[in-house]
Amino acid sequence: MASVSQQDILGFFQLLIVAGQETTANLIDNFMLCMMEHPEQLARLRSAPELLPSAIEEVLRYHSPLQWIMRTPRHDIELHGQTLQAGKLLHCMVGSANRDERQFPDASRFDIARDPNPHIAFGHGIHFCLGAALSRLEAKVAITDLLARFNHFEPAIHEPWQPREALNVHGPASLPIRTRIMV
């Protein structure tokens, strides 16, 4: 039986902390961004709060916090008439796959009640993200609180939002908002 070193365990937990924080923060930022870009969907959510889990899933699809991942097949694989060679690095575009018209009718439309919503924002199969449930829970708690505290929010500046300067994660570099607090 192989043993795992203390350094390997520490590295694994560091990965979980960083990966979990990064994607969840971008999920919450992207949620706020989507609601400001689609105020009719925010109004729909406010009138039907039970749509929050579906709204979170749509944000994960529409503005996936993780845009790409790398994989290396162990064996040659044929996919859509192309051979993916064993040992060759693949660049899998999650953000693009989540906008695939063959999987998502009217894929460029943001719809908080989209059903089904088979996005791959957290991966799939044996590569499914270990922290997906925690990220969804953290987002649900944070967003519920934000929606309860603020009856209105809008961009504080009227310039297009700027993405973070990162290759594989997706979210705004900053998102100044103007709010009204619930009284």
Image (cartoon, helix red, strand yellow):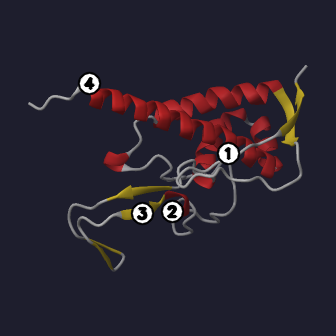
Q: CA distance from mark 4 to mark 2?
A: 37 Å
| Circles 2, 1 touching at the beta carbon (< 8 Å) | no
Are the residues tagged 4 and 1 within 8 Å (C-beta)? no
**Upstream in the sequence, badge 1 or badge 3?**
1
The N terminus appears in which quarter of the rendering?
top left
Residue that mark 4 sits on: 6
Name which of mark 2 and mark 1 comes first in the sequence.
Answer: 1
Q: Nearer the viewer, mark 1 or mark 3?
A: 3
What is the three-letter code of the residue carrying label 2?
A: Ala
Q: Is tag 3's residue or tag 2's residue first in the polypeptide sequence?
A: 3
Q: Nearer the viewer, mark 3 or mark 2?
A: 3
In the displayed image of the protein, which residue is found farthest to the front? 7
Residue 152 point in image, percent of width and height: 87, 35
Image x and y of residue 166, in percent: 58, 52
Which numbered dot is residue 30? 1
What residue is shown at x 35% (from left), y 32% (from top)? Answer: 11
Residue furthest bottom in the image: 81
Q: Which residue is mark 3?
A: 91
CB atoms at circles 4 and 2 under 8 Å apart?
A: no
Q: Residue at x 74, y 46 (%)?
A: 33
Horizontal side, residue 155 vs residue 138: left or right: right
Which label belongs to residue 97?
A: 2
Q: Residues within 10 Å of mark 3 (few under 14, many from 20)?
A: few
Q: Nearer the viewer, mark 4 or mark 1?
A: 4
The amino acid marked with disc number 4 is Gln
Residue at image coords 63%, 52%? 165
Local crowd size for mark 2, using a 10 Å CA cut-off: few (<14), some (14–19), many (≥20): some
Q: CA distance from mark 1 to mark 3?
A: 23 Å
Residue at the left extreme of this rendering? 1
Q: Is residue 143 left or right of residue 10?
A: right
